[in-house]
């Protein structure tokens, strides 16, 4: 008399069945794919988008106002400006002639009888105007597209003069233009009674922003870790005493000489640890405060105001909105979400 | 809502490109020997950098539609360069000094002038690029443009000598002992309104 095998031990003939094996693998892949989609499309409100839009509106305004007195000097052609727009445009065209440039706008202006100076002034005024529109939430989508285009033209034409803040601004405006605007706090929503956007689509664009920031800090932190100067504080010293970042007197910095190595290593740890600790509920607030404080310090101590603002806006929009403050209990938490391979602790608000 | 698959496909391509750009930047630093990693890795890093560049279409001919499409997308999305700011180490900074020789024999010293802090950051960016060997063919043209911009404001200047060099700031210990920064000229150009004489 046979009692058969215990049910927990599979029959070897079943385990070796290639059809069943393939079926099991497919089921596993389907589950992983579903989890991946759940991770990529979490339901979200549009509060983060409102913060992103308002922040980028301020950024565009800051960009135009800070450059108001140097705009023509930086972007005019050779013989009128500092270096001449043509050089930057030639370098961009070598990469691809399809990359937008201010030269395109000047050429269009010449067709309708407008001089280069007038076209540059109009471009500056349009950027300022659409920065205001973004801030208020008026014609959000159009404002985001035009702000992205004009800023891209300026960044590419002045390619030799561009720095990190320009890349981040282009990137942020690119994402803003593709995000499901308008948000419920915009004037568009009040004036035109726009329908609420798909929550999963809102979640997708926030995820894109979140993952991109993880790339930024991980690679930034890793590159810093590979430099000896970040371990002994000498890189901080060198970055703070070189023009045009030397807003603080070296005599003051010398007083904090023992703090510089600690600060240098802390910056590396904060950046390289960002892709891990920003996702964990218990450390998210701390990491967000640290990274925002780091950018605020860069802005105030090195005069990189635009760089600091765009990074703080990106961080607040991607991880700051809906964050739980430590030591403050939330009312009835509800049911727990199952955690899969791609599920995150970033539960929707 | 457009099919999720379209979004997922875009997401995959977008982050694939970002990953390639980031690795290209990182491997470039290692290949230059600028990191604390052993120099034996430099050759491998250079090969890896070339691989990343190939993935980004940079090995294709300049007129290749694939190369141009990728480049256009990277620039449009603001992801054409990696995130290795202030890394791995911070070198000295660069200075461009313009000696202005007036017709009456006076000599004045100038540097590229802009009015705002935001524009000063851009000048710093430009000077860093001029020091980069990849921008060597552009150096003379850029310096000439800058000299020309100074000339427009001071038409009575007879000749301009532009000297570009690196400045090594003192370490903190040296600074405490009173040591100042040192200037190392890299190249200089003489410009006059009618003739241009280059001395290097």
Image (spheres, coloured by chain):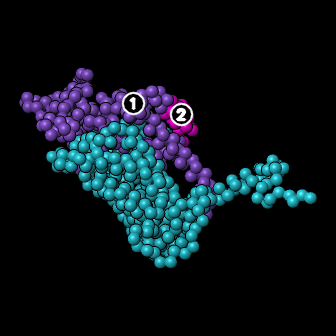
Chain colours: A cyan, B purple
Q: Position of residue B6 (x, y in %)?
A: 62, 55
Residue B170 lies, with reference to residue A181, above or below; the image says above
Q: Position of residue A223 (x, y in %)?
A: 40, 41
- Residue at 15% of width from left, 29% of height from top? B158
Residue B119 lies, with reference to residue A41, above or below; the image says above
Q: Is residue A142 visible?
A: no
Identify the element where label 2 is drawn.
helix
Outermost residue toward the bottom?
A: A331
Which residue is identified by label 2?
B51
Front-lying residue, B131 or B119: B131
Q: Position of residue A218 (x, y in %)?
A: 44, 48
Relative to A174, A249 lies left or right: left
Total labels: the figure holds 2
Is residue B51 a member of the stretch shown in magenta? yes
Q: Is residue A12 visible?
A: yes
Q: Identify the subunit bearing mark 1.
A: B
Same-subunit check for callouts 1 and 2: yes
Identify the element where label 1 is drawn.
loop
- Alpha carbon separation for disc pair 1 and 2: 18 Å
Q: Which segment did they paint magenta?
A: B47-69
Dividing the picture into quadrants, the one containing residue B170 is top left
Which residue is identified by label 1?
B33
Relative to B134, B106 lies left or right: left
């Amino acid at each position: 008399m046979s009692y058969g095998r215990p049910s927990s031990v599979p029959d070897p003939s079943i385990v070796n069945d290639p059809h069943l094996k393939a079926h099991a693998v497919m089921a596993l892949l389907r589950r992983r794919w579903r989890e991946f989609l759940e991770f990529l499309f979490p339901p979200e409100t549009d509060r983060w988008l409102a913060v992103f839009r308002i922040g980028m509106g301020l950024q565009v305004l800051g960009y135009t106002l800070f450059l108001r007195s140097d705009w023509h000097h930086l972007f005019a052609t050779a013989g009128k400006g500092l270096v001449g727009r043509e050089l930057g445009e030639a370098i961009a065209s070598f990469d691809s002639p399809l990359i937008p440039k201010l030269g395109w706008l000047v050429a269009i202006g010449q067709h309708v009888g407008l001089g280069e100076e007038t076209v540059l002034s109009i471009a500056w005024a349009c950027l300022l105007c659409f920065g205001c529109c973004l801030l208020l939430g008026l014609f959000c989508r159009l404002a985001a597209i035009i702000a992205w285009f004009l800023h891209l033209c300026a960044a590419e034409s002045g390619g030799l003069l561009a720095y990190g803040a320009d890349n981040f601004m282009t990137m942020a405006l690119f994402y803003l233009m593709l995000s499901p605007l308008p948000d419920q706090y915009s004037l568009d929503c009040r004036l035109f009674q726009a329908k609420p956007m798909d929550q999963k689509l809102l979640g997708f664009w926030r995820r894109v922003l979140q993952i991109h920031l993880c790339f930024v800090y991980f690679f930034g932190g890793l590159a810093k870790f590979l430099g000896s100067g970040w371990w002994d504080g000498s890189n901080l010293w060198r970055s703070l005493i070189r023009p045009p970042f030397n807003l603080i007197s070296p005599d003051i910095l010398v007083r904090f000489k023992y703090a510089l190595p600690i600060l240098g290593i802390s910056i590396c740890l904060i950046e390289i640890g960002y892709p891990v600790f920003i996702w964990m509920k218990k450390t998210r607030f701390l990491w967000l405060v640290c990274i925002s404080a780091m950018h605020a310090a860069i802005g105030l101590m090195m005069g990189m105001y635009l760089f600091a603002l765009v990074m703080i806006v990106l961080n607040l929009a991607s991880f700051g909105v809906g964050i739980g403050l430590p030591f403050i209990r939330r009312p009835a938490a509800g049911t727990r979400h199952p955690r899969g391979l791609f599920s995150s602790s970033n539960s929707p608000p | 809502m457009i099919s999720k698959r379209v979004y997922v496909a875009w997401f995959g391509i977008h982050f694939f490109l970002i990953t390639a750009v980031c690795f290209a930047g990182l491997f470039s630093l290692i290949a230059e020997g600028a990191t604390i990693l052993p120099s034996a890795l430099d050759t491998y890093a250079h090969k890896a950098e070339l691989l990343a560049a190939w993935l980004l279409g940079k090995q294709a001919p300049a007129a290749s539609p694939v190369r141009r499409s990728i480049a256009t997308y990277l620039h449009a999305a603001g992801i054409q360069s990696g995130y290795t700011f202030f890394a791995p180490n911070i070198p000295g900074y660069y200075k461009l000094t313009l000696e202005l020789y007036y017709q009456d024999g006076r000599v004045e010293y100038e540097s590229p002038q802009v009015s705002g802090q935001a524009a000063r950051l851009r000048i710093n960016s430009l000077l860093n690029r001029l020091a980069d060997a990849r921008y060597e063919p552009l150096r003379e043209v850029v310096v000439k443009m800058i000299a020309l911009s100074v000339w427009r404001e001071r038409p009575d200047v007879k000749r301009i000598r532009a000297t570009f060099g690196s400045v090594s700031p003192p370490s903190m210990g040296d600074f405490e002992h009173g040591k100042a920064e040192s200037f190392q000229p890299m190249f200089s150009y003489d410009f006059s309104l009618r003739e241009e004489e280059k001395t290097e």
